[in-house]
Image (cartoon, rainbow, N blue to C red):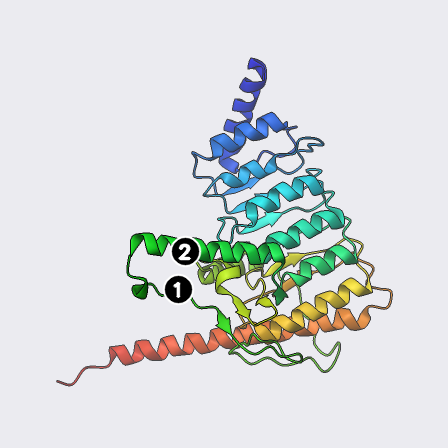
């Protein structure tokens, strides 16, 4: 890296850092690496590198080592499946700091979408994900949807689970010689049912019966950001938490994980998704409605610009209906919670008789 390049980078960084933007400024892999090093010592939480197309040696994943980063936008960055693999490897950590990830208008294809799905199987921090205009087909759409509801652990994931349990037991034995005083976290146990899911939601859910009877209106970006801010209060911050350990049900044949219930906003617009992918979205939304509480799971999904106009009217109506019902459930839960808080505050103001 020449002295001129370093001076240019420093001036660009000083000019744009306060706005958290380094957009369309022809960043190279070397400059991205340098930026990642500088970010580690800053308090920047939102960063946009839109329009920095790096064809080879894509290293945007280095930015994810910044422990304070909450929002990252990499739109128009020419990210390919190999680059997405590196990003997914960084974000498989369940409690990463990142909440919002924008990967719109890249070159992910189905292979990149499968890396996204692998990331979502274990990540429980990302609440908003933009995958629009990435040439994703039914295959990639189905892979992403399968990570958002109950799924069976793969052999590698089972090995990871056993290794973590062994390490926990080993650490407990080293720190406490009396084995009787160590109580490991027991997995959930339930009999497997072929007709119903083994995971249950305490809140009630209804199955949509009339297609097209209720239309779900897309929320504005401000509403979505507000919803993410509110839902972030429900994220599990236990440092020992892992969905393959804490959110599983085991029987003699399989180990089931309840799926990702943290992602609430997903943009799949302007891809190449057809009827089969639309049905996968419907199935996922329906299962989430049955499995998760009203304030968990997808509440906004954008699908415009796909080939849904050819024989997908029923699926589109079903998506609208389920999301509308979920919005109603969320409002009802919030209203009950607000009423309970008001009633409790009134009781606390009553004079005490002594």
- Residue placed farthest to the bottom in the image? 353
Where does the image place residue 310, in percent across and percent down from the top left?
Answer: 87, 65
* 34 relative to 258, above or below: above
What residue do we see at 78% from left, 49% from top? 135
- Viewer-nearest residue: 24 or 169: 169
Q: Is residue 302 left or right of residue 40?
A: right
Q: Nearer the viewer, residue 143 or 49?
A: 143
- Name the spot of residue 129 as percent of width and height, x first: 62, 53
Which residue was labeled with disc 2?
168
SS at circle 1: loop
> How many numbered markers are drawn?
2
Q: Quadrant of the C terminus?
A: bottom left
Task: Describe residue 18's horizontal placement relative to residue 289 as left or right.
Answer: left
> The N terminus lies in which quarter of the figure?
top right
Quarter of the image for residue 206 reads bottom right
Image disc number at residue 96 = none
At 60% from the left and 37% from the top, the residue drawn is 60
Q: Residue 49 occupies which quadrant of the picture?
A: top right
Q: Nearer the viewer, residue 160 or 118?
A: 160
Mark found first going from the N terminus, 2 or 1: 2
For label 1, the residue is: 184
| Proximity of marks 2 and 1: CB atoms separated by less than 8 Å | yes
Q: Nearer the viewer, residue 18 or 142?
A: 142
Residue 261: image x %, image y %? 56, 64
**Furthest residue to the right?**
310
**In the depicted structure, whether residue 111 falls above or below residue 327:** above
């Amino acid at each position: 890296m020449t002295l001129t390049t370093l001076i240019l980078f420093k001036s660009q960084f000083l000019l744009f850092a306060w706005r958290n933007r380094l957009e369309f400024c022809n960043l190279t892999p070397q400059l991205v690496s340098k930026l990642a090093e500088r970010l580690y010592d800053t308090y920047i939480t939102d960063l946009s590198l839109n329009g920095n197309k790096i064809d080879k040696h894509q290293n945007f994943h280095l930015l994810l080592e910044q422990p304070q980063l909450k929002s990252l936008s990499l739109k128009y960055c020419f990210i390919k499946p190999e680059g997405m693999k590196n990003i997914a490897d960084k974000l498989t950590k369940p409690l990463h700091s990142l909440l919002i990830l924008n990967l719109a208008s890249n070159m992910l294809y189905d292979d990149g979408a499968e890396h996204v799905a692998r990331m979502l199987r274990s990540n429980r921090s990302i609440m908003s994900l933009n995958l629009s205009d990435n040439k994703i087909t039914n295959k990639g759409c189905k892979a992403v949807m399968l990570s958002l509801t109950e799924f069976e652990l793969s052999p590698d994931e089972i090995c990871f689970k056993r290794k973590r349990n062994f390490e926990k037991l080993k650490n407990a034995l080293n720190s406490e010689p009396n084995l009787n005083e160590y109580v490991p976290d027991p997995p959930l146990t339930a009999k497997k049912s072929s007709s119903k899911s083994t995971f249950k939601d305490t809140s009630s859910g209804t199955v949509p019966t009339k297609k097209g009877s209720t239309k779900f209106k897309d929320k504005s970006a401000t509403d979505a950001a507000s919803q993410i801010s509110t839902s972030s209060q429900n994220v599990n911050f236990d440092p020992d938490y892992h969905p393959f350990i804490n959110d599983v049900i085991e029987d003699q044949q399989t180990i089931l994980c309840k799926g990702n219930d943290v992602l609430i906003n997903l943009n799949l617009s302007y891809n190449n998704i057809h009827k089969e992918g639309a049905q996968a979205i419907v199935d996922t939304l329906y299962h989430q409605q049955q499995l998760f509480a009203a304030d968990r799971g997808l509440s906004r999904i954008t699908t415009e610009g796909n080939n849904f106009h050819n024989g997908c009217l029923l699926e589109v109506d079903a998506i609208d209906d389920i999301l509308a019902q979920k919005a109603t459930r969320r409002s009802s839960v919030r209203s009950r919670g607000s009423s309970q808080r008001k009633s409790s505050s009134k009781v606390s103001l009553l004079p005490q008789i002594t």
